[in-house]
Image (cartoon, grey):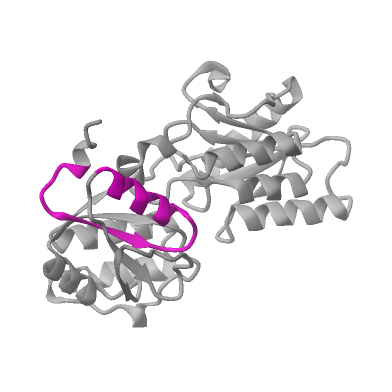
Amino acid sequence: MAAPASLAAKGRLAIIAGNGLLPVHLAEAARAAGEDPFIILLRHETDQRFEGFETTTMAIADIAGFNRILRQHGIDRVVLSGGVTRRPEWRDVRPNWKMLRKLPALFRTLVSGGDDALLQMTIGILEAQGCRVIGAHEIAPNLLARVGPLGRQIPSDEDRRDIEAAAEAARRLGELDIGQGAVSVGGRVVALEGVEGTDRMLERVAGLRAEGRISSRRKGVVVKLCKPQQDVRADLPSIGPSTVRNAAAAGLAGIVVEAGRALVLEEAALIAAADEAGLFVCGIDPGLAGGGL
């Protein structure tokens, strides 16, 4: 099998690894495609082991240190992967001369910008160091969600109404650069994702359900969509077995993501967990009638 075009360059690939399993999947996929990826572990964020890979640890805002790593290891491509729980502050930034003119804009973004604005700034800074930022889907295209159900369960007509309501809420939320997910129960949007992330949002829904604030007779759906203005090279929505567990604990009927613009991690384990819990997991295409379901 031919390697993806993004893997065909002569320079070395670096994977900037936050928390979660995505960086591990990307490292393994890159190696399978003939790469020797260099793993940059984000201090206080990375929670996985990368045995057998060359690694270094650096602070998230150490631009000068990143530039040294690029030169020392011949890196010409970088992929951003994994979660980041702590937003850097301006005092964390370690600049080099290449980004001095960008400092005022960076400080403004750190103080008041949303996640997408910060990621756009990050990509610009990294590329100013002389490398090209590529998307996780270019390294492991098999992780992209596809249209239709992944497991045995399929949405009911009531679920489809919830999908429409939650998808519209998630789209508007994304336009505001706030979050990527929403939950609808009985056609009513009951939760929006903020900086806490999807799992914490689902924990909140479970708590509301236990308090009787959400109907126990209707299940509901969580939908995760890419922000309309989002650069797909960073922070694509992702789901995994933990998403299924949290959705089940919240009493939901299913999980929906955007096909081609969301990542499905540990798909076999996710499908097994969803089938066991009686949940559907589907990919939709917002451009098609009914999402293509």
For the residue pair 163 and 9, the one nearer the viewer reads as 9
Give above or below for 225 relative to 76: above
Quarter that holds the N terminus: top left
Q: Which residue lies furthest to the bottom in this view?
A: 91
Give above or below for 48 relative to 197: below
User: Residue at (33%, 75%) from the top-left corner?
Assistant: 57
Residue 21: in magenta span: yes
For the residue pair 242 and 85, the one nearer the viewer reads as 242
Residue 71 image point, x, y percent: 11, 68
Q: Residue furthest top?
A: 289
User: Residue at (26%, 57%) from the top-left corner?
Assistant: 37
Q: Image quarter for residue 268?
A: top right
Residue 24 at least partly seen: yes
Q: Give the range drawn in magenta.
A: 7-33
User: Residue at (52%, 44%) from the top-left corner?
Assistant: 266
For the residue pair 81 and 166, the one nearer the viewer reads as 81
Q: Is 214 left or right of 266, judged from the image as shown?
A: right
Residue 188 at least partly seen: no
Q: Is 25 left or right of 127, judged from the image as shown?
A: right
Residue 62 image point, x, y percent: 28, 76
Q: Is 135 left or right of 111, judged from the image as shown?
A: left
Q: Image quarter for residue 115?
A: bottom left
Residue 122: in magenta span: no
Quarter that holds the C terminus: top right
Give above or below for 182 relative to 125: above
Q: Which residue lies furthest to the front in this view?
A: 52
User: Residue at (88%, 55%) from the top-left corner?
Assistant: 211
Q: Is 263 left or right of 72, judged from the image as shown?
A: right
Residue 197 image point, x, y percent: 57, 56
